[in-house]
Image (cartoon, rainbow, N blue to C red):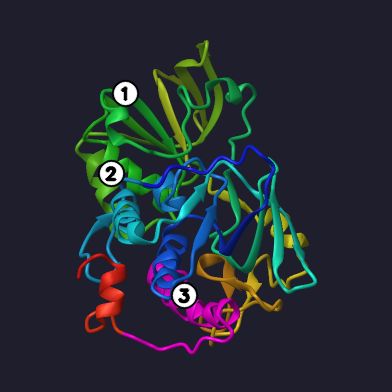
Amino acid sequence: MDTPVAQTDGAVIETDVVIIGAGPVGLFAVFELGLLDIKAHLVDILDKPGGQCAELYPEKPIYDVPGLPVVTGQELTDRLLEQIKPFDPKFHFNERIDELEKQPDGRFLLKTDIGTTFLTKVVVVAAGGGSFTPKRPPLDGIEAYEAKSVYYSVRRMEDFRGKDILIVGGGDSALDWTLSLQPLANSLTLLHRRDDFRAAPHSVEKMRELVADKKMRLIIGQMAGLDGADGALEGVTVKTKEGEERLPINTVLPFFGLTMKLGPIADWGLNLEENLIPVDTEKFETSEKGIFAIGDINVYPGKLKLILSGFHEGALMAQQAHRYIYPDKKLLFQYTTSSSNLQKKLGVK
């Protein structure tokens, strides 16, 4: 992976394209742009590339990426990073684009929350659903246990081996991690407020089989309190219709969903539709010429929130971006399988 860029002298970074978001769709956009000799800088609020794939489910299998029968979020990120190496993208992690202003010459001036400044001809918003934060359970003092005993995502399953785990929730994330972590845990309990789940039926069926075989426990109720010291959890009190019970738990994984926020993007003057950015389906451009939106952040008739859809959107975006960046240069469509020019760029010829 490219070393993140540090801007220390206050100079403005001039580039062809700034991509906001370094998830799978943003990474693949680098590839499509690179084939057309377009250089890109990527800015992401997270501390590493991969977006939600790498942040929320790095070890969770994905089954609908073309050509890869199964791939984890982290593996997909790693493969995309390898694919875009020839184009030498520049990454700016732990930063958020706070300001965007169109200049008299048609370019855009962007500034991050720590003062990094870009001057670019094209902006590509590939920010997924925007900034996302997990919904916190309404328990007093839970902050003291976060990142020590309470976790809102699983980055490495091995970290949970031998733990006494309480998973809270009834959706796909809760059930998926119940099934994945049960073989590793010393004990595992699933807590949900009702005996009805929003997860895939086959996951619920497998969970109930584990409960029947006494390999895990299912409790219908809610968390009522945490106890421990210095961030180390020792027990969780749960409230059920029978009363309260204290569980000897040292690890809690609450899956209450995510709160999505567009953040500063909402103030850029783009047309918005329920916190998503409408685009055309010819080039995936927004209401502002030169600003594109690809991936889960955009909306259009028939939109499917799939990684493969974002890849397609990135390819068409790059074609229009070329027209802005090289207005006097004819765009010649080429195939990587037959173009010696493209193969040379990729380092395979």
As shown in the figure, which amino acid type bears the numbered disc 1?
A: Lys
Q: With 197 as the anchor, is 294 left or right in this view?
A: right
Residue 17 lies, with reference to residue 74, above or below; the image says below
Residue 20, percent from left and from top: 57, 58
Circle 1 is placed at which residue position? 163
Quick check: is 307 in the magenta stretch? Answer: yes
Q: Are marks 2 and 3 in contact (CB under 8 Å)?
A: no
Residue 166 lies, with reference to residue 234, above or below; the image says below
Seen at 60% across and 41% down, the residue is 7
Residue 318, percent from left and from top: 49, 76
- Disc on res. 304: 3
Q: What stretch of residues is rendered in magenta?
A: 305-334
Seen at 49% across and 29% down, the residue is 242
As shown in the figure, which amino acid type bears the numbered disc 3?
A: Leu
Seen at 34% across and 43% down, the residue is 177
* Relative depth, front residue between 324 and 142: 324
* Relative depth, front residue between 292 and 40: 40
Going from the N terminus, do you reach mark 3 or mark 1 first?
Answer: 1
| Nearer to us: label 3 or label 1 | 3
